[in-house]
Amino acid sequence: MASANEIPTGASTTPTASTTTAFDAASKLYSAWEKLLDDPSWKPSMIGAVGSDYQDEVICVNDEKLQKLRREWGEGPYKSVVDTLVERKEYDFDGTLACDLWNYKEGRKAILGECIDYLLDQVKQLTIIRHRKSRRLG
């Protein structure tokens, strides 16, 4: 999360390039965009009106650097960078690790109550195990 995904390259982006050349080009592109994404002075976003009383910051897809990426490398790398920007905005990324807890049974993000219930169940299980071990030793 919050870093550029592997940038799609290969036959779709460089049809005449050899595998080594394509890999080198993709590595350079990936490194350049990682640096740009971490640069606090580059913020391709703008304030957009969502409602009469509410404004939200949205990704400006007309940003010069994003448009250049789209023209030169195609839709795959462009989408990867935009998705990264959206994730960073969603998680208020400031360089610290942010993660989601997932409810795999229902295929969605877990809500706070589910997270607390899970943690309490884990504490109960560990307490039971500890008591069993102490009885054996005692």
Image (spheres, rainbow, N blue to C red):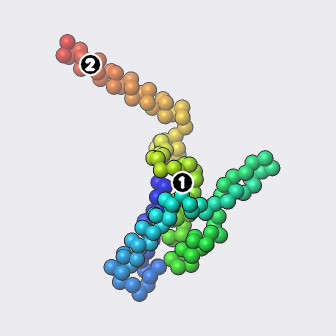
x and y, in percent, of residue 38 in the image: 49, 59
Q: Is 21 left, or right, of 109 in this rendering?
A: left
Residue sitting at 72 percent across and 57 percent down?
48
Q: To which quarter of the image does residue 82 belong?
A: bottom right
Q: Is 99 left, or right, of 135 in this rendering?
A: right
Q: Nearer the viewer, mark 2 or mark 1?
A: 1
The amino acid on which the numbered mark 2 sits, given as a three-letter code, is Arg
**Looking at the image, which is closer to me, 73 or 127?**
73
Of pointers 2 and 1, the one earlier in the residue sequence: 1
Of all residues, the one furthest to the left in this rendering is 137
State whether residue 69 appears in this view.
yes
Of all residues, the one furthest to the bottom in this rendering is 16
x and y, in percent, of residue 40 in the image: 54, 58
x and y, in percent, of residue 115 in the image: 49, 34
The amino acid on which the numbered mark 1 sits, given as a three-letter code, is Arg
Real-space Cα separation, disc 2 to disc 1, in angstroms? 45 Å
Of all residues, the one furthest to the right in this rendering is 52
Q: Is 67 left, or right, of 73 in this rendering?
A: right
Disc 2 is placed on an element classified as: helix
Residue sitting at 69 percent across and 52 percent down?
56
- Residue 88 image label: 1
Q: Say above or below: 107 vs 120.
A: below
State whether residue 70 appears in this view.
no
Disc 1 is placed on an element classified as: helix
Residue at which label 2 appears: 132
Q: Quadrant of the C terminus?
A: top left
